[in-house]
Image (cartoon, rainbow, N blue to C red):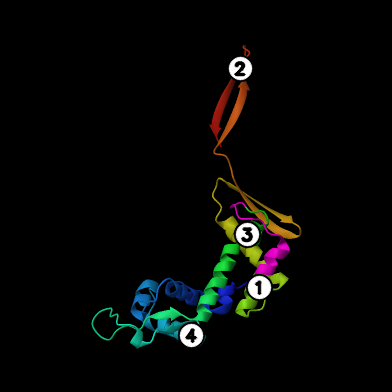
Amino acid sequence: MESIVERTIGQTGYELLQIVAAKEVGFNRLLSQLHMNNHTLRKELQKLEKEGYVEKRPRKEFEQRSGPGRPEEPYRLTEKGTKYFAVIKELEDLGPLHLRIVPTDGRPAVTYEQYVEKRRKAYDQLGIPFPTAKEIREENLDFFADQVRNLHPNVIMLIETLNGEPRCTVLMKPFYVVKKEKLEGCRGRRIVIEPT
């Protein structure tokens, strides 16, 4: 399933918005930060301008020159771009479902219904159809598959179903084992620490 970013402005467009959201920036600086060719960047910026996410600041408002030649016109987020960026950030902060039902990062837990409602609200704000149950399942499976591919040798992953929804728990395997052994011929015990 495509992410909400892919369904709206695409990954390149989102990277552009992140840079412009941090600071108004001109074409040449964007070109050097994104390491893409001139034509691709110009096309992407025109698309974002046409859709109303970014705008060029009028020349009268700035006197900044980035070198010899005419001054660079910096791009800035429009109100729509600012709103879009805030909604995407809110979704990123919400995180994957399995981490919100049983959080391990200190954030408060949410019910499945609360989680879906927050996501649905974000999709509505952006004017995008909410994913179907099948698409959400595919998204969860893709996430779990990525987690499994990136497992460290000393990590155990438990994937289970909780209230009909998949949940993923990551546990660290111990690096050593403590064994208690009885010593023969005496009443003492020996404790042995062995690597796993």
Task: Classify mark 2: helix, strand or loop.
Answer: loop
152 relative to 163 in the view: left or right: left
Task: Classify mark 1: helix, strand or loop.
Answer: helix
Residue under label 2, please give it: 183
Residue under label 1, please give it: 121
Residue under label 4, please give it: 47
Residue 152: percent from left, percent from top: 54, 50
Say which quarter of the image contains residue 168: bottom right
Label 1 sits on what residue type? Lys
Label 3 sits on what residue type? Phe
Q: Is residue 66 above or below residue 189?
A: below
Mark 2 and 3 residues: CB-CB less than 8 Å, in contact?
no
Query: Is residue 137 among what the camera can see?
Result: no
User: How far apart in space, not on screen, are marks 2 and 3 (Cα)?
Assistant: 46 Å
Mark 3 and 1 residues: CB-CB less than 8 Å, in contact?
no
Q: Looking at the image, is mark 2 or mark 1 nearer the viewer?
A: 1
Residue 144 numbered mark, or none = 3
Q: Which image quadrant: the C terminus?
A: top right
The residue shown at (63%, 75%) is 123
Q: Residue furthest top?
A: 185
Q: Which image quadrant: the N terminus?
A: bottom right
